[in-house]
Amino acid sequence: MESLRVALGSRSYPIHIGEGILDERALYLPYVTAGAAVVTNTVVAPLYLPRVRKVLEAAGAHVTEIVVEDGEQAKRWQTLERIFDAMLAARLGRDSLVVALGGGVVGDLAGFAAAVYLRGVALVQVPTTLLAQVDSSVGGKTAINHARGKNMVGAFHQPSAVIADVAVLDTLPDRELRAGLAEVIKHAVALDVPFMEWLEKNVEKILARERGSIGYAVRRCCELKAAIVAADEREAGVRALLNFGHTFGHAIEAGTGYGAWLHGEAISAGMVMAAELSARAGLLARADALRVKQLLARAGLPVAGPALAAERLLELMAVDKKAAQGKLRFVLLEGIGRAALRGGFDERQVREAIVAAAQ
Amino acid sequence: MESLRVALGSRSYPIHIGEGILDERALYLPYVTAGAAVVTNTVVAPLYLPRVRKVLEAAGAHVTEIVVEDGEQAKRWQTLERIFDAMLAARLGRDSLVVALGGGVVGDLAGFAAAVYLRGVALVQVPTTLLAQVDSSVGGKTAINHARGKNMVGAFHQPSAVIADVAVLDTLPDRELRAGLAEVIKHAVALDVPFMEWLEKNVEKILARERGSIGYAVRRCCELKAAIVAADEREAGVRALLNFGHTFGHAIEAGTGYGAWLHGEAISAGMVMAAELSARAGLLARADALRVKQLLARAGLPVAGPALAAERLLELMAVDKKAAQGKLRFVLLEGIGRAALRGGFDERQVREAIVAAAQ
């Protein structure tokens, strides 16, 4: 097991990465009081909920299990209401703990529930997908969706700990593994040339579920993300770079109906669009845009958007959080590993990049 | 005009108190960017919304007006959804400002909307009721209600400024004025003997709407509250003392259906119950419990609970946030001006105090 640290003063916390650590009692013990709610979904519950329940009980907690539906559509108020209702029925007080056991959806949902239940209770993230282990469980972003856009309502609520057991990825479907790989590739493309080169050598090993390679990728992503979150917790600056591919990606998810495309799949096509726009804006060499696209293709990820008019994507992007007062801003590439926030694009340029990325 | 300061490091903010300052441009200017949403209700909108709209526009903002229904029942998710929808339709970004123009309900609701819209945007509180000016607009507590209890879902989200114009209280109905006075009396009874003595001399002047007396009461409450919030922002300790009367009061509100009793009215009866329990527990002299009751009665406030079984109030209190693991804790009095958190009461003692307070 390795442990990293997200340095945020009094809100600092550890990220534990290892094999078989899902029910390592010592990792939960510091955060357990009398009551704990474990939020998970119908897919993860039969696989891992009994082990997590057992370790929390061994640590002294009375455990309330809350099992939500699987998929992005769970990120809505009605699901939150069910969580609040179960927690209130169990009389969980301000000193209780929420454990988010699942992927990005469960982490966002349970994290937001923890952020606002009785104005905020403690949270431990136990990510069970590659996407959640390398990205969404770290950094405190939580949210639910709105008909007008993804993650429009939420909070920054840092966990007390992240427990990433790479052994649980054994049960992850291939499609989900690839979707997680999209966020791994994002970290490399946006921030880290040596990691990009490592991925270009090892992407097939990850797809073949070689634990050593997966463990390395998780650790490297967490290191990169921990440093960025420590520097800019509330995304006033550098943290926005982690949204590379996300402005396009969120529009794809919204336009196709949340859940049709997995988040990582939408981000993959979104990164190709962002790289294309970067190349067209003269920021990125054509060869590097191609390099991004080729790595995503090798990972089995979509490199072209859905059958949606560019016009519709543009409309959806205008309400994205990164659109300030109608002006479109994007995280673009000034080279591999060198993401930068660039604004002032007009709709024509963006439309052309969307169309070109589909070629 | 007088200005106090809530000292919270980088989140410090001013409280401006004065007559006719509702549309003082200089007070808004530091917080206005391109977009502002003013949240108010159907009663306040015709009275003060045009002036606030005008001052925000003069300060350079595009203004979105969001008018919600009047009353406690507005503090629910459906109302929040309307606010989010209007803000998203206006394409308000992360740099936008929410102005809460109204009483405690509007402040809680608009404050929570600001706390979670795009994971948090800036907020200016413009309280238009005595209750909001002396209490709820200061300190960053925001929330909505849940069928199982009041303020169960919310956030700590400090405003960027509080603008308390005592002249707007001229249009406040008498019943609302008295309800606000309950929170004024709470500050004195819980924290400040000289203020208690001042109120015992001047309560009729406040009821007669003498602006100087109202202004003094607002300022003294804000001073007391600012000091407490600065010492304990997230209610880990001393801030809980401001909940004097609230455990009983919240149960009264929930048991009678939110809105039947005004918050201040429920708190008034709650304070009588808490003083009774304090006397029965041997903490408070009988004469002092009577002194609390008499001041509330002079303010025209209820000093007995509603026609609800003590049993039902107990049941409702058990889910209150101040109930830790089924054990009942209360803010009690060890004397006038000396509130203290006391736990470990069994249901019988509390039931007897509820019954006795109704005598």
Image (cartoon, coloured by chain):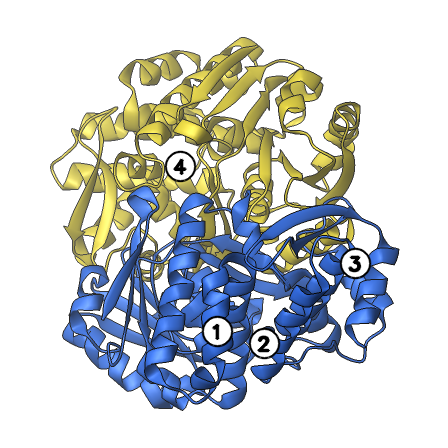
Chain colours: A yellow, B blue
SS under mark 1: helix
The dot on residue A268 is: 4
* Residue highlighted by disc 1: B199
* Disc with the residue nearer the chain's start (1 vs 3): 1
Task: Please report, as a chain letter, where disc 1 is located.
Answer: B
In the image: residue B355, left or right of residue B35: right
Residue at figure coordinates x 63%, y 45% from the top left: A94
Q: CA distance from mark 1 to mark 3?
A: 26 Å
Between the residue at mark 4 and the residue at mark 3, the CA separation in whole angstroms equals 67 Å
Residue at position x 27%, y 17% in the image: A193
Dot placed on the residue nearer the N-terminal end, 3 or 2: 3
Residue type at mark 4?
Ser
- Residue A222 image position (x, y, % from top left): 44, 22
Label 4: chain letter: A
Image side of residue B246 versus residue A224, left or right: right
Q: Are marks 1 and 3 in contact (CB under 8 Å)?
A: no
Circle 3 residue: B280
Specify the amino acid type for callout 3: Arg
Q: Secondary structure at mark 4?
A: helix
Q: Are the residues under marks 2 and 4 on the same chain?
A: no
The reply to the same-chain question for discs 1 and 3 is: yes
Percent x, y for residue B151? 60, 61
Amino acid found under the numbered disc labelled 2: Leu
Location of residue A46 in the rendering, given as x and y in whole percent from the top left corner: 78, 34
Rounded to the nearest angstrom, the CA distance separating label 2 from label 4 is: 67 Å
Chain of residue at mark 3: B
The image shows residue B285, relative to residue B81, as above or below, that is: above
Element at label 2:
helix
